[in-house]
Amino acid sequence: MTDPDPAVGRATDPAAGGPIRLLVVDDQFLVRSGLAALLRAAPGMEVVGEASDGAEAVALAARTRPDVVLMDIRMPGMTGIQATERILAEAVDPAPRVLVLTTFDLDEYVYGALRAGASGFLLKDAGPERLLAAVTAVHGGDALFAPAVTRRLVEAFTRMSDTGPPGAPDAGPPPGLTALTGREAEVLKLVARGLSNAEAADRLFISEATVKTHLNRTMTKLGLTSRAQAVVVAYETGLVTPGSTGGM
């Protein structure tokens, strides 16, 4: 576990009110140090710690309270999935955003990480610009990947694991989503099918801001921490079934 000197590589972003505080977690030293060096050199970002396994990540996250955690998923001992669950469960509000690092875009572990509350995933071979854009997007509350990629990932693993009962696409919220209003369920359904906020707004003839409001309320009611996790819940409860593309 490494606690970098906070004075080293610190960058401030006046428009955002301060730098994005980052924790880098990877069991491979060269990968971890390379990511940390890249992030330290970027304006508006500050690496507050590095961890070589899940247990160290949990302890360091509690101590440094990062805004974003770059989480390796395959590590000895506590995995990235387990560490993500612990970090988010024990976090003091606001909880950090977890950005999962993986080698394959359909790695089965990625699905588990999304269920655990991760905000998205990034391939380890992504370039520097993609990494920085992903960190910024996740910090801002967005999913780091395109909605269509979210849908493809979730469909693949709901089909494999057969989780959640199949439901009629237009039958209203299933039992697990009874806390939602009809409009909130509609928004969640469209997001789960891969539509962006703007596309969902066009489909429902409402503003994009209203879509965001409905989605935020949905996440609050269901105790979710990310858009990706909301998509998983939509599939697992049967609100949307794999392969469904029906309209509203």
Image (cartoon, rainbow, N blue to C red):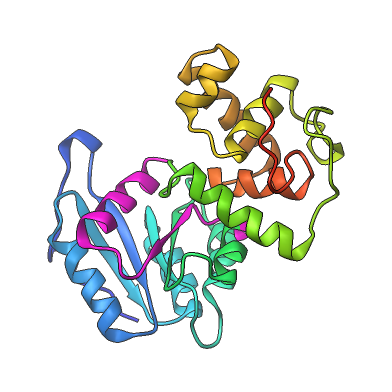
Rendered location of residue 122, percent (x, y): 39, 61
Rendered location of residue 176, percent (x, y): 82, 41
**Residue at coordinates 22% horizontally, 75% vertically from top-left?**
34
Q: Exactly how many numbered labels are in the figure?
A: 0
Rendered location of residue 88, percent (x, y): 55, 58
Residue 119: within the magenta? yes
**Residue at coordinates 63% horizontally, 36% vertically from top-left?**
220
Q: In the rendered image of this protein, does residue 29 appear above or below residue 237?
A: below
User: In this view of the protein, can residue 93 be seen by the observer?
Assistant: no
Rendered location of residue 243, percent (x, y): 68, 46
Quarter occupied by residue 159 = bottom right
Depth check: give the residue in front, 246 or 34.
246
Residue closest to the far top: 205
Residue closest to the far bottom: 76
In screen coordinates, is 128 left or right of 193?
left
User: In this view of the protein, can residue 214 be seen by the observer?
Assistant: yes
Depth check: give the residue in front, 80 or 247.
247
Quadrant of the image containing the C terminus? top right
In screen coordinates, is 155 left or right of 176?
left
Q: What stretch of residues is rendered in magenta?
A: 115-141
Depth check: give the residue in front, 197 or 168.
168
Residue 33: within the magenta? no
